[in-house]
Image (cartoon, rainbow, N blue to C red):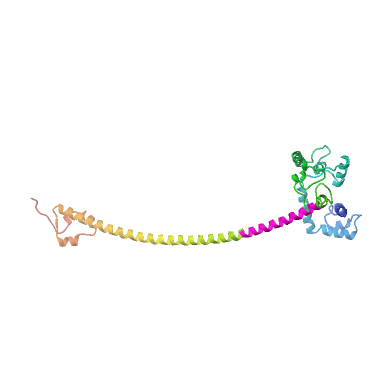
Amino acid sequence: MKRILMMSFGSKWKESKHEAKTIGYDPYNTDIERLAHCPDRVEEDQWRSLVHYWSSKEAKEKSERNKESRKKLTMPHTSGRKSHSQIIDDMTKMNNGVKPTRIEVFKKTHIRANKEPVNEIAGEVMKQMDDLAEVYPELNVPGSAPNDVYSQVMGSDTHGIVRTLGKGASPSLVYGPVYKRSQTEKRDFDTRVEMEVQKATSAMKIEMTEKMYEAKKEMEAMDKKLLEAKEEAKENNEVMERKLSEAKMDMEEIIADKVKEGIQAYVESLGINIDANLKSEQVPDNPLKDCQQPSSLVPGVHTRKLV
């Protein structure tokens, strides 16, 4: 009872501040104007504190966050200022003392006067609840249960509150000490699981670090081998180029000797004698070029009469 009363007082105080802000703060642009329009039900010193707080950066940021959260509300209720506790009490009286299920409370607070859902999302949620309740009727029990149809569709209850039951409906009060003990065991289990996950993660990180180090060493060794192979290939290329150059020079000398021998044989076949001493002096390095000159210009050449 104390819990419910304190929550009710908190709600009333919140509503009172909202009303005061709507009357004396929001309509004006400066704090001087706001201080001059203190609501009748608020003391002046308290009003100064409220104006100072609402004008602070912290309060403005909080207000913006609340506005954004409000925009994300997908299924607004249609119960107005009437509390869920009062709605459940009225539904219980109309049903001969039998408490409504959480599905029935949800439907009651999310339909319009024409019996239509407040929006398409609410209508789809209601359909899912009805379909699941038809398949598992044992989960659609009066009052509430931790694993009833409502929780299957909407998710588990958050800490400290059982949805659709109104203010003060905490899980330990609604479901009893067994639920409280089970929640404690669940938290202990989650803690153990988290610790095991952290250990496994740490072990995996260590193993991954070691493997990365080994891979880095292997890559360095491969780079070293590749560099050595490049150096060796470079040396081999230099040796090959040198051998090719030497072979080319040898081939040129062989070709030159063959050309000289061919020219000499050709001249002799024509019956032309060349003195040995003249041959050694006159035969140029490029005999083909000189043999293209007229034979009459070749000195020391004697012809003989052919029989």
Residue at the far top in the pictured view = 114
Which residue is nearer to you in this view: 300 or 136?
Answer: 136
The residue at the point 57 percent across, 61 percent down is 210
Q: Quadrant of residue 255?
A: bottom left
Residue 181 among those drawn in magenta: yes
Q: Specify whether residue 35 is in view.
A: yes
Which residue is nearer to you in this view: 206 or 257?
Answer: 206
Q: Where 16 falls versus 123 (above or below)?
A: below
The residue at the point 15 percent across, 54 percent down is 268
**Start-end of magenta stretch:** 177-203
Estimate the x, y position of residue 146 in percent, counting from the top left. Answer: 77, 48
The residue at the point 17 percent across, 54 percent down is 265
Q: Specify whether residue 287 is in view.
A: no
- Horizontal side of 290 relative to 234 (left or right) equals left
Estimate the x, y position of residue 48 in percent, counting from the top left. Answer: 86, 60
Residue at the far right in the pictured view = 40
Estimate the x, y position of residue 71 in percent, counting from the top left. Answer: 76, 48
Residue at the far left in the pictured view = 307
Total numbered badges shown on the rendered structure: 0
Estimate the x, y position of residue 241 in percent, counting from the top left. Answer: 35, 59
- Horizontal side of 209 relative to 109 (left or right) equals left
Q: Where 108 falls versus 54 (above or below)?
A: above
Which residue is nearer to you in this view: 144 or 77?
Answer: 144
The residue at the point 47 percent across, 62 percent down is 224
Residue 103 among those drawn in magenta: no
Q: Quadrant of residue 193?
A: bottom right
Which residue is nearer to you in this view: 290 or 257?
Answer: 257
- Horizontal side of 225 relative to 34 (left or right) equals left
User: Would you say the magenta stretch is mainly helix, strand or loop?
Assistant: helix
